[in-house]
Image (cartoon, rainbow, N blue to C red):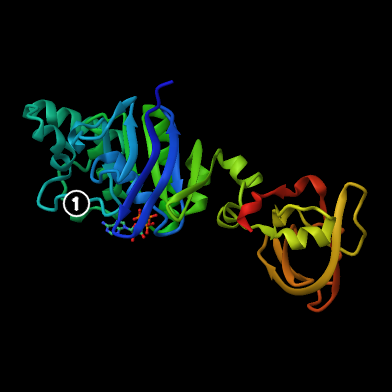
């Protein structure tokens, strides 16, 4: 099978920093693929290696089956949208969008026609004559997108493109980006450190940590079956039980994680298919639709998130109270033993 982008044992080292460390990865054509991870984990370097702004120290990048080494950025079938948009302030919005075609020598009338079509695609059909300074952040972001799309790349690289927008606009743009990607069928490779953003838009997500990949999976699998303690903790919130805690709790010899919303809190004993323990309630946060209960048990803390409005919830509600936590055994997800 030919992949849109494939990494084979890819590494990039800067002096002594292993920014990307022996990463192998396949991204399929038409996928919305996210690279998710904390600052400094190597995501941007991966994107730059695909674009051709960086060269591998070892291993290779293939784009639609072709070895990319030696191909300059403009010879690669990819285009990049940066976080700072990088629009030319002295040019109109339409000229900004048409810029790539001008460089290619496309004649003026055709440039204008295509730029207008792209602006309509990103719902800015009436804004072509303005300067970038006369647009809002979200509108500028869409101009940058139109400018990247006009050259009809088969792969679009997006580096935290929504980072500068406020929460509401960001959520709206997430929906628009996803729908645009579906409509165009272009492969999107999206870099973000925001797990909510990655989960809501992507077909698959690669979770980066210190230059390597911890797990590649669909958002649902990533959330319900995190492979490592790092993923369990970085994607959503999780209770991670290391091997020692697992041994005491259930005689299991492997670390595991449980999502807080799978943990019941109350006074009743665990059922047959459940495990449980008692602890001291140390904090309660009321959040409207849910409440977060923090319980100290043994040496650790366990978080339980429940619907506080259910009729049968009886926690005693008092900080310092002794409470029982119970969870279905099947909610326990084993983690790679090396990670604890
Ligand atoms: P962020 O979310 O903050 O952008 P990131 O996951 O994209 O982070 P990278 O920008 O890929 O991370 O950086 C990975 C590591 O490589 C970091 O430790 C960074 O300091 C280092 N690094 C990246 N580019 C260079 C460079 N040109 N010279 C030296 N070190 C670099």
Front residue of 34/134: it is: 34
Q: Name above or below for residue 168 compared with residue 286.
A: above
Dot 1: what SS? helix
Point 67% across, 62% down: residue: 288
Front residue of 216/140: it is: 216
Residue 136 in which image quadrant: bottom left
Q: Is residue 1 visible?
A: yes
Point 9% across, 52% down: residue: 90
Residue of label 1: 132
Q: Is residue 124 visible?
A: no
38 left or right of 280 in image: left
**Where's the C terminus, which quadrant?**
bottom right
**Where's the N terminus, which quadrant?**
top left
Of the four image quadrants, the one with ligand 1 is bottom left
Q: Residue furthest bottom?
A: 320
188 left or right of 316 in image: left
Q: Position of residue 335 (x, y in %)?
A: 66, 50
Q: Position of residue 87 (x, y in %)?
A: 19, 49
């Amino acid at each position: 099978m030919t992949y849109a982008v494939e990494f084979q044992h890819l590494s990039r080292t800067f002096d002594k920093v292993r920014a990307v460390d022996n990463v192998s990865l396949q991204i399929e054509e038409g996928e919305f693929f996210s690279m998710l991870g904390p600052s400094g984990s190597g995501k941007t370097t991966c994107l730059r290696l695909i674009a051709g702004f960086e060269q591998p120290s070892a291993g290779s990048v293939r784009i639609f089956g072709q070895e990319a080494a030696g191909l300059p950025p403009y010879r690669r079938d990819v285009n990049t949208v940066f976080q700072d948009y990088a629009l030319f302030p002295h040019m109109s919005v339409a000229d900004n969008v048409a810029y790539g075609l001008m460089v290619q020598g496309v004649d003026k009338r055709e440039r204008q026609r295509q730029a207008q079509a792209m602006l309509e695609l990103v719902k800015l059909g009436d804004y072509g004559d303005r300067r970038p300074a006369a647009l809002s952040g979200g509108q500028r972001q869409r101009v940058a997108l139109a400018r990247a799309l006009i050259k009809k790349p088969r792969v679009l690289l997006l580096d935290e493109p929504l980072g500068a927008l406020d929460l509401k606009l960001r959520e709206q743009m997430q929906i628009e980006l996803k729908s645009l990607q579906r409509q165009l069928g272009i492969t999107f490779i999206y870099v973000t450190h925001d797990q909510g953003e990655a989960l809501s838009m992507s077909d698959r997500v690669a979770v980066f940590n210190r230059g390597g990949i911890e797990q590649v999976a669909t958002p649902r699998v990533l959330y319900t079956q995190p492979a490592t303690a790092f993923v369990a903790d970085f994607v959503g919130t999780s209770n991670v039980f290391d091997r020692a805690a697992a041994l005491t709790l259930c005689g299991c010899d492997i670390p595991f994680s449980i999502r807080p919303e799978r943990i019941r809190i109350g006074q009743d004993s665990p059922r047959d298919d459940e495990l449980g323990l008692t602890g001291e309630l140390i904090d309660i946060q009321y959040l409207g639709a849910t409440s977060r209960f923090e319980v100290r048990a043994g040496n650790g803390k366990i978080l339980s998130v429940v619907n506080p409005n259910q009729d049968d919830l009886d926690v005693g509600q008092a900080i310092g109270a002794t409470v029982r936590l119970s969870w279905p055994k099947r909610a326990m997800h084993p983690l790679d033993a090396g990670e604890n």
